[in-house]
Amino acid sequence: MTAEELLRRAYAEHERVALVASFQAESGVLIDLACRIVPEPVVLTLDTGRLPEETHEVIEQFRTRYPIRLRVIQPDAGQVEEMTAEHGTNLFRQSVDFRMRCCDVRKSQPLTRALSGYDAWITGLRREQAETRKETPLVAPDPQHGGIQKFAPLAEWTKQQVWDYIREHDVPVHPLYAFGYTSIGCAPCTRATAPGEDERAGRWWWELGGVKECGLHLPQQPREANA
């Protein structure tokens, strides 16, 4: 199935569908496609509290240009306060475990709570992005979120295809791409990459080896909605 066909299937088979966007290049493609298929698609985005200002700028561009129902999801303030009081605001630099805890509080748990009312969700994962994503299915039940369907319409796309689509349809682009960024997350955890580096090499670059994932897309035990 093409990406458009898979998106049409998602919206045809499920009443409550959320497109989860980080507002990187893949998110832009999916939003543009979704707005051609359904009126006012729901778009969820995670405001971790540590995003670059450029991310907020591009979110506003999409909000004003496209007929989307945007939901900005934030972490639980009490959990963030407890975590930073115990380990500091930059605990993610102390160890991989602390980094994963920060991602869990700021990203994974908020997404779980947000998706509890949906039947399916759409993500911009591509198999080419990283070794950990090479087996990404186009569609499959998501045990992390109550078994709802998880759609990855761009899983088989190359980076070139993404940018060709963006140029052809004049999709807004995150400003940090112009400064050498190839994967964009929280400001203190993301840097530009050098020519020849892996696409996600700029994420948590101080960690030597290991898995460059935040936990949103790693196989895990099912999470309770109120965790």
Image (tube, rainbow, N blue to C red):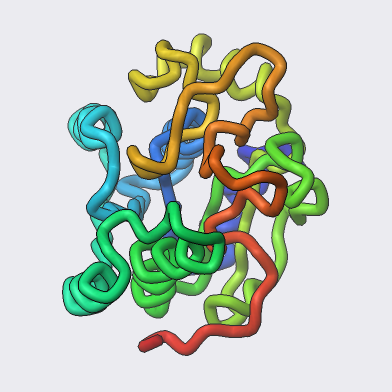
Total marks in image: 0
Q: Residue 54, percent across and down?
A: 26, 28
Residue 86 occupies quadrant: bottom left
Residue closest to the far front = 94
Which residue corresponds to the image point at 54% horizontal and 41% vertical from the top-left? 206
Which residue corresponds to the image point at 27% horizontal and 63% vertical from the top-left? 88
Vertical comparison of 157 with 9: above or below: above
Residue closest to the far right = 135
> Quick one: quadrant of the C terminus?
bottom left
From the viewer's side, name the closer residue of 95 and 27: 95
Residue 197 occupies quadrant: top right
Vertical comparison of 80 with 9: above or below: below
Residue 34 visible within the image: yes
Q: Residue 225, percent across and down?
A: 42, 85
From the viewer's side, name the closer residue of 2 and 171: 171
Say whether residue 62 is left or right of residue 186: left
Say whether residue 12 is left or right of residue 78: right
From the viewer's side, name the closer residue of 86 and 103: 86
From the viewer's side, name the closer residue of 176 and 98: 98
Which residue corresponds to the image point at 53% horizontal and 57% vertical from the top-left? 214
> Quick one: quadrant of the N terminus?
top right
Q: Residue 217, percent across and down?
A: 61, 60
Q: Residue 68, percent across and down?
A: 28, 44
Say whether residue 121 is left or right of residue 45: right
Residue 115 visible within the image: no
Vertical comparison of 42 with 81: above or below: above
Which residue corresponds to the image point at 58% horizontal and 49% vertical from the top-left? 8
